[in-house]
Image: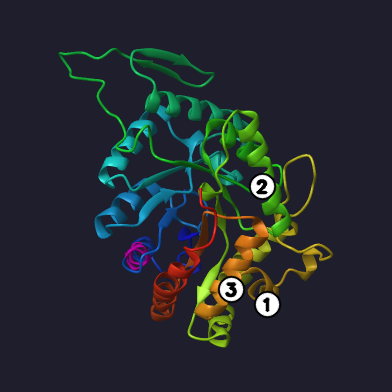
Amino acid sequence: MDIGLFMAPYHLDYSAGRRGAQDVIEWDLQVSEWADRYGLHEAYFAEHYTIGREPSPAPDLMIAAAAQRTGRIRLGAAAHLLPYHHPISLAHRLMWLDHLTGGRYIAGFAPGSFPTDAQLFGMTLDQNAAKHAEALDIISAIWTRPPPFRLETANWTVDLPAYSEQWHGPHLKALQRPHPEVIVSGMQPASPSFQDAARRGFSPMSQQVGYETLCAHWETYRTSATDAGLVPDRARWRVLRDVFVAETDEEARRLVLEGAAGRTWREHLLPTFKAIRNRGTKTYALGELLVDPGMTIDDLTLEWLVDHFFLVGSPDTVVAKMEAFNEQLGGVGTVVSFVFDWSADPEAFRRNLELLGTEVAPRVAKVGPKG
């Protein structure tokens, strides 16, 4: 089992006008450097346009910058929002990014979930799913099909010409063959995103939800992959779960409750999880996917999350919690922890990453799926 990081990114002081965009960028790049130094496996950058508390409109630029300051860690997008890009341009830019990172790039794709982002592009969320699927078809074709070919969808047309000796092209292929690993995230128990990802041979990334929903995620993915004639591989399953390590259990708990993580959950994430409703056939608050059976969303507090949901504690405690987490789920490839803006107390977060990479990661590498 590997350990990774996810920079949404969460920057409450940026949205309050106390820090600028350059501060946001530098903090996330500094975290990437630390993660690389201490041997963590991968780091992801998100894409949002209108969300001031999660400012990150260009994950490809962050990956390119992080690649220049790191040497080993894999760098991914979680995710490029396909309805807001021309898929031909994005497919080529990401192949170039694969070369720029030396083959460390992980592609992540999603349809987008914020209505204000969709509004910015003159769309509604109801339109996003179809454009997302079309874009996936186009990007996959450009990455894998030899020229010439023509592909028409409702929104785009690809007309890839035959190779020309005059122009010496088309020429570009990804460094990783046949293309970079592709991840797709999901949250609903029977996630349509996971069904499609499984059929395409892509990897699943589960959002931060409870055990019952996580088990449903894997069953949804496993069934769809098997039905498509593919072999599902738990080693490719990423699961998001907040992790924080300090010298003692008491210190770790205090730092999370009183520090940047606790503040972000209290002021931003908990209200969001309790307010946002699922848009599928069953209506429920997204926060209901986090709680244990018998609990209600009113029981969802920061203290409960720290004590019963997150993986918080000393190195020994976090190793034990990660082993139990892995056992309960039947095997996970990578646990991915959110990153918060600890720039007011950077040493606490740096030490957390050091303990995570040098003391926890080598021990949990021995557990998890074998393939």
Q: Position of residue 213 (x, y in %)?
A: 71, 53
Is residue 267 visible in the rendered image? The answer is no
Is residue 161 visible in the rendered image? The answer is yes
User: Predominant secondary structure in magenta?
Assistant: helix
Above/below status of 369 relative to 89: below
- Which is closer to the viewer, label 2 or label 3? 3
Q: Which segment did they paint magenta?
A: 29-36
Q: Position of residue 101 (x, y in %)?
A: 29, 47
Q: Determine the residue positioned at 71% across, 42% down.
A: 190
Amino acid type, mark 3: Ala
- Which is closer to the viewer, label 3 or label 1? 3
Q: Counting residues from the N terminus, which is met first, the one under dot 3 or under dot 1?
A: 1
Identify the disc placed on residue 303.
1
Q: Determine the residue positioned at 80% across, 44% down.
A: 282
Q: Position of residue 333 (x, y in %)?
A: 52, 54
Amino acid type, mark 2: His
Question: Contact (CB < 8 A) between labels 2 and 3?
Answer: no
In the picture as drawn, the residue positioned furthest to the right comes out as 294
Amino acid type, mark 1: Glu
Residue that carries the numbered disc 2 in the rendered image:
217
Q: Determine the residue positioned at 39% across, 80% down.
A: 347
